Every structure is written in structure tokens, then in C-alpha cells.
Image (spheres, rainbow, N blue to C red):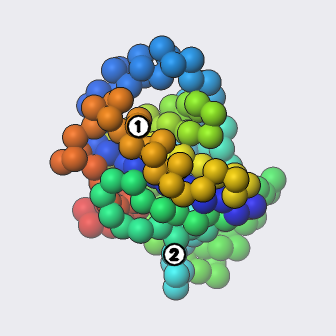
């Protein structure tokens, strides 16, 4: 399955405020997921195996490394046997880095929200406007991200251009 995402990632110490805003908008709470993302060494884009209680998949994506809303082309593969898959990918490609996080997951229509606590990095919020079937378009996705960016009062200096994996690799 391939989809278009427009994403925003920001450092945040306003988790309670954001949580209250989401609740006031009747966001659908999917739960709290402990996720371990294993990134593999690849020649283009990023390849990760996500192992969680709620979300589990092999994900390849290419994303702009810019602050603010950024475009991602994402391909998912849902695997029932993630342990064999991890072993094969580890042996074939090698592990680049492992990201360990606790993530609260919310949805409002096609927009997904993450309130994250990432081991060795801190606390963050992510906004992902998702076009699952190509019917929404990137302009509307950008508009949705900017709306929530303003609603959550996220400052420009808190925006992050990198993935958690890149941040951990720099440490």
C-alpha cells in the first residue's frame, strides 16, 4: 500500500495542552503504543520495521528533510511474522539505528496525531495529513497540517527537519 503524507514534527513540552485540544475536537484515540523502529541500511530513502502493540509494519519512505510541513511518499507492508522479517533484513542489509518510543495515537478524519516520548531524545508531537487513495491532494494536506500547527501553537523554532533516527545517529 502506498500513500502520500504531509508531516510536521516538533519538539514539545505541551503534551497535556495538545491532548486536551484533541479531546475537545473529539479525536479518535487509538491508544498508547510502545514502538521499536529498526532502521536498516539502504541506498535510497529509509526502511524501517515497526514493532508495536498497535502498529506493526515494514515501511519504506522518502521524505524531504525540511522544517515545517514536508512531503513523504510511503509504502507499507504488514507482516504477521515480523521476527523472521527482522532477522532476514538485519542479515541482508545491516541495522542502522533503533528508535524506542512511547506514542499516543489520535485521528481526526485523515489526520493522524502522535504525542511521542522518544528514548534518549525527549518529547515531541507529530501531525500527519494522509492521502490514502489519492483523492485529497497535497495542497489540502498542507492546509490541514498548517491548521493544526497553528491550533497547537507550535513555534517555528520547535519544528524539526530530521527523523528520530537521524537525531539519534548524530548523538
Badge number at residue 93: none
Mark 2 closeness class: few <14, some 14–19, many ≥20 residues within 10 Å: some
Residue 117 horizontal/vertical position (percent): 39, 38
In which quadrant of the rendered image does the C terminus lie? Answer: bottom left
Residue at 41% over, 16% down = 20
Q: Residue furthest right?
A: 80
Helix, strand or loop at label 2? It is loop
Q: In this view, does 144 lie above or below 133?
A: above
Q: Is residue 149 above or below residue 130?
A: above
Q: Name the residue under label 1.
A: 147
Badge number at residue 45: 2
User: How many marks on residues?
Assistant: 2
Q: Are marks 1 and 2 in contact (CB under 8 Å)?
A: no
* In front of the other: 60 or 50: 60
- What is the quadrant of residue 133 in the picture? bottom right
Residue at 70% over, 53% down = 135
Q: Is 57 on the left or on the right of 71, as rendered?
A: right
Amino acid at each position: 500500500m502506498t500513500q502520500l503524507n504531509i508531516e510536521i514534527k516538533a519538539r514539545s513540552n505541551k503534551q497535556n495542552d495538545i491532548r486536551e485540544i484533541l479531546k475537545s475536537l473529539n479525536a479518535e484515540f487509538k491508544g498508547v503504543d510502545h514502538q521499536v523502529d529498526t532502521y536498516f541500511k539502504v541506498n535510497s530513502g529509509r526502511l524501517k520495521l515497526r514493532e508495536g502493540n498497535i502498529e506493526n509494519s515494514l515501511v519504506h519512505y522518502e521524505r524531504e528533510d525540511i522544517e515545517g510541513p514536508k512531503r513523504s511518499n510511503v509504502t507499507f507492508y504488514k507482516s504477521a511474522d515480523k521476527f523472521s522479517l527482522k532477522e532476514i533484513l538485519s542479515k541482508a542489509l545491516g541495522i542502522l539505528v533503533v528508535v524506542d518510543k512511547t506514542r499516543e495515537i489520535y485521528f481526526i478524519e485523515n489526520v493522524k496525531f502522535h504525542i511521542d516520548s522518544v528514548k534518549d531524545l525527549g518529547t515531541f508531537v507529530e501531525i500527519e495529513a494522509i492521502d490514502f487513495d489519492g483523492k485529497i491532494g497535497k495542497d489540502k494536506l498542507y492546509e490541514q497540517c498548517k491548521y493544526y500547527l497553528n491550533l497547537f501553537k507550535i513555534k517555528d523554532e520547535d519544528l524539526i527537519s530530521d527523523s528520530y533516527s537521524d537525531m539519534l545517529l548524530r548523538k
